[in-house]
Image (cartoon, grey):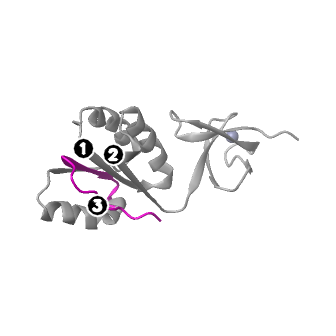
Amino acid sequence: MRKAIFVSGKRKYLFCGAQEGMKLLFAVIERVKEEGHPYEIVVIDDIQESLQLSDFLKKQKMGTYLYVALSHTELKRVEKTAEEAGLTEEETQFIGYGEELKRIFCCRCHGINEAKNFEEEILCNQCGLELSVSDHYSVYHNAVLGYVAKL
Ligand SMILES: [Zn+2]
């Protein structure tokens, strides 16, 4: 697991994450408080809120440094959101936790399945279709698309 690292000399520090993730940012938040830098904490506990994050990030001024700590499954979407809001790698740190599961979207029943990272084929747990895991990630579904496996 990556650890959050304090980066000095920023105008403002922005901490986003789920309740669980905030623990991982704790040391950095304490440091920022101690040194008296401006900061803001945004707790996002579900995926809807992380969608609204987009507008919020776009409103941030230059010089804002963003920390995000979320489970691996949710982190991917927020990474994308931050990128679209114009934040670069030098302005962000993403800390993922928990098991690294991929969400797989079933092309037939539109159900969401979870698969371990190395799995290439799974059975849809809702309709039983054999799915081949693509590398096509859909932001809308926050999932990788699963296509009908070739026999
Ligand atoms: Zn299905």
Determine if the magenta segment contains residue 6: yes
Q: Are marks 3 and 2 in contact (CB under 8 Å)?
A: no
First in sequence: mark 3 vs mark 1 = 3
Proximity of marks 1 and 2: CB atoms separated by less than 8 Å? yes
Residue identified by numbered label 1: 64
Residue positioned 68% across, 34% down in the render: 107
Q: Earlier in the sequence, mark 1 or mark 2?
A: 1
Res 51 → quadrant: top left
Nearer-the-camera pick, 20 or 37: 37
What x and y, as percent, mark residue 42? 26, 49
Residue located at (26% from left, 63% from top) = 28
> Alpha carbon of mark 3 to alpha carbon of mark 2: how far?
12 Å
The residue under label 2 is which amino acid type? Answer: Glu
Q: What secondary structure is found at the residue carrying circle 2?
A: helix
Q: Residues within 10 Å of mark 1 (few under 14, many from 20)?
A: some
- In the displayed structure image, the side of residue 135 where residue 16 appears, left or right: left
Range covered by the magenta-colored residues: 1-19
Q: Is residue 76 magenta?
A: no
Q: To which residue does mark 2 refer?
A: 91
* Label placed on residue 6: 3
The answer to whether mark 3 and mark 1 are in CB contact below 8 A is no
Of residues 107 and 52, the one nearer the viewer is 52
Considering the image in quadrants, where does the C terminus appear?
A: top right
Image: 124 above or below 84? below
Give SS at disc 3.
Answer: loop
Q: Position of residue 115 (x, y in %)?
A: 64, 53
Helix, strand or loop under label 1: strand
